[in-house]
Amino acid sequence: MRKFDGDRILFATGNAGKLAEMRALLAPFGIAVDSLSDHALPEPEETETTFVGNARIKAHAAAKATGLPALADDSGITIDALDGAPGVYTADWAETPQGRDFPMAMTKTWDKLEAANAPFPRTAQFNATLVLAWPDGHDEVFVGRLDGQIVWPMRGAQGHGYDPIFQPDGFDTTLGEMPTDKKNDISHRADAFRKLVKGCFA
């Protein structure tokens, strides 16, 4: 496993919430985190059908374009009663002509569960795959997961995405109700990040 030995990394995302989360996670290591917008880079088209495939597209495109090591995440929610949907299409369910509307996406998700007469608990998983790519084409892959269930109505204004309807196993609150530091301790991205630290930073 290749170790990271620089002091600057590019996090290949256009999502402000994910960027803030990653900057917080990397701050203790003294690593500066650039964003795509810092380099005027667009997000590449995600053409793969797996989290790791899409994360690789984003990480390698950013590393090649900037000459910096690049970290990319592809994440989403998989719901058992919906045969794993929305999965890699998690963000797509929120797309509207005016931008992403996650309250609409969460309502759509619940409506689909109701239409399927899905049994309770409506188990689901938040999945995160982190790919760290170097400009020479090498990469390392780390996979994180958080198990829980879909609940209704939406609860909490913290976090982002589907957090207000996801209640992690062992908790009686949704991710949307949790303080940021608590969520960052248990999240799927934090799980993947711990593996990244152990593999590349430790």
Image (cartoon, rainbow, N blue to C red):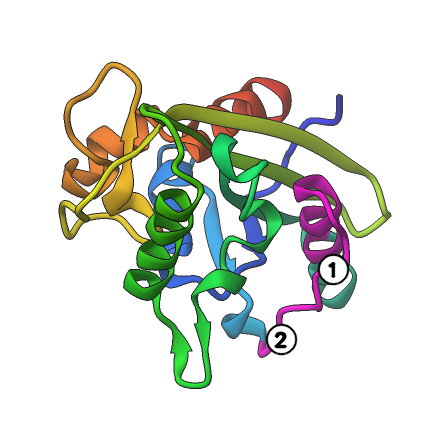
Q: Residue at x 36, y 40 (%)?
A: 27
Q: Residue at x 39, y 85 (%)?
A: 98
The one nearer the camera, 64 or 172, is 172
Q: Nearer the viewer, mark 2 or mark 1?
A: 2
Q: Which residue is mark 2?
A: 42
Number of marks in the image? 2
Instruction: Please tell me whether mark 2 sits on a helix, a strand or a loop.
Output: loop
Return the residue found at the far bottom.
97
Q: Is residue 147 above or below residue 46?
A: above
Is 42 included in the stretch rendered in magenta? yes
Is 146 included in the stretch rendered in magenta? no
Q: CA distance from mark 2 to mark 1?
A: 16 Å
Q: Is residue 45 visible?
A: yes
Q: Which mark is residue 129?
A: none
Specify the quadrant that holds the C terminus.
top right
Q: Position of residue 11 (x, y in %)?
A: 54, 54
Specify the quadrant that holds the N terminus.
top right
Q: Which residue is mark 1?
A: 67
The one nearer the camera, 185 or 167, is 167
Q: Position of residue 44 (x, y in %)?
A: 69, 68
Q: Are marks 2 and 1 in contact (CB under 8 Å)?
A: no
Q: Residue at x 39, y 37 (%)?
A: 117
Q: Is residue 161 visible?
A: no
Q: Position of residue 9 (x, y in %)?
A: 57, 50
Q: Is residue 67 above or below residue 182?
A: below
Kind of residue sitting beneath label 2: Pro
Label 1 Cα crowd, 10 Å radius (few <14 / some 14-19 / many 20+): few
Specify which label sits upstream in the sequence, 2 or 1.
2
The one nearer the camera, 17 or 160, is 160
In this picture, which residue range is highlighted in magenta? 40-59
Kind of residue sitting beneath label 1: Gly
Label 2 Cα crowd, 10 Å radius (few <14 / some 14-19 / many 20+): some
